[in-house]
Image (cartoon, grey):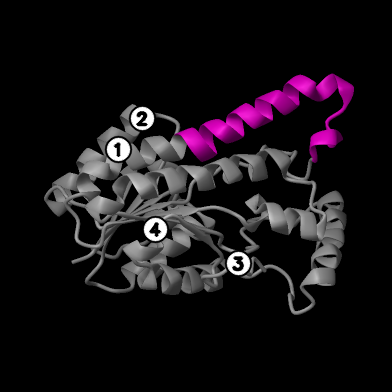
Amino acid sequence: MPSYAIVGASRGIGLEFVKQLSADPKNVVFGLVRNPAGSTKLTEIKAPNVHVVKADITDRKSLDAAAAEVAKVTGGSLDVLVNNAALLPEGRTQRSLGGYGPDEQETLAEDLREAFNVNVVGVVHSINAFLPLLKKGSLKKVITLSTGTADVDFTLKVNFPITAPYSISKAALNMVVAKYAVEYKNEGIAFLAISPGLVNTSEKPPSPEELEVFKALIATFQKDYPHWNGPITPEESVKLMLKVINGFTIEQTGAFVSHYGNKQWL
């Protein structure tokens, strides 16, 4: 029975991973969330192969406790770890580095620190907490969600200055994946950084300001990606990513790919 731990499973892409993986009764799926009581969409999944576990990616002790809970169910092993939890600075997701005013430089520094703490340090803690279980697993895969906006060539090609703290931290995350890949290849643990594509995970309508930014974004992307018709759903994204994940082998460890399994980010 393959076992999967999804870090950041309360909503959006993480929740969809739980839904699709648990549809196969042979899988054992753990949804890791900071606040189980508040994660109603996750707790509403009543499948017997789904386990909700409390964990905070910014708290190593919390992750160690979560790994211990997973081990109780699996007998001490884990096949696949999916690092989905991430941070985009609240209310400033569209900011460029130069978009922070002279009186907002400390806000910029704090956004960079917080993004790095969650998107890089948090993932390192998550991986380290579950490594002992992964070493005893059969599939031995660590999947970490990145973003195409962390790709330097893509950023330059489409002239994409916004989401700066998020993109910068995710670019560092790709190196984290590469470092783990070379360290644990001989032990058969495969590491993958994968972009889910541009996914609509919003749970409320966009504000007029957000809508204008989004329209401009679509127009910018379609200049270089004329086939692109806008954001995809979490369901479509996870379906595509699982196809890549299932076919991913140790020979490809350390790769950074899109939901299509290549460098086509949109």
Q: Nearer the viewer, mark 2 or mark 3?
A: 3
Q: Earlier in the sequence, mark 4 or mark 3?
A: 4
Q: Amino acid at mark 3?
A: Lys
Pick the front one: 172 or 14? 172
Q: Are marks 2 and 1 in contact (CB under 8 Å)?
A: yes
Q: Earlier in the sequence, mark 3 or mark 1?
A: 1
- Distance from the alpha carbon under mark 3 to that under mark 1: 30 Å
Q: Is 71 located above or below residue 230 in the figure?
A: above
Quadrant of the image for the C terminus?
bottom right
| Residue wearing tag 1 | 129
Q: Are marks 3 and 1 in contact (CB under 8 Å)?
A: no
Q: Amino acid at mark 4?
A: Thr
Image quarter of residue 153: bottom right
Q: Earlier in the sequence, mark 4 or mark 2?
A: 2
Q: Earlier in the sequence, mark 2 or mark 1?
A: 2
Mark 3 surroundings within 10 Å by alpha-carbon count, few (fewer than 14), some (14 through 19), many (20 or more):
some
Q: Nearer the viewer, mark 3 or mark 1?
A: 3
Instruction: Say what secondary structure mark 2 lies in.
Output: helix
Q: Amino acid at mark 2?
A: Arg
Q: Amino acid at mark 1?
A: Ala
| Residue wearing tag 4 | 253
- Distance from the alpha carbon under mark 4 to that under mark 3: 16 Å
Pick the front one: 262 or 57? 262
Instruction: Say what secondary structure mark 1 lies in.
Output: helix
Q: Which mark is residue 263?
A: 3
Q: Nearer the viewer, mark 1 or mark 4?
A: 4
| Residue wearing tag 2 | 60
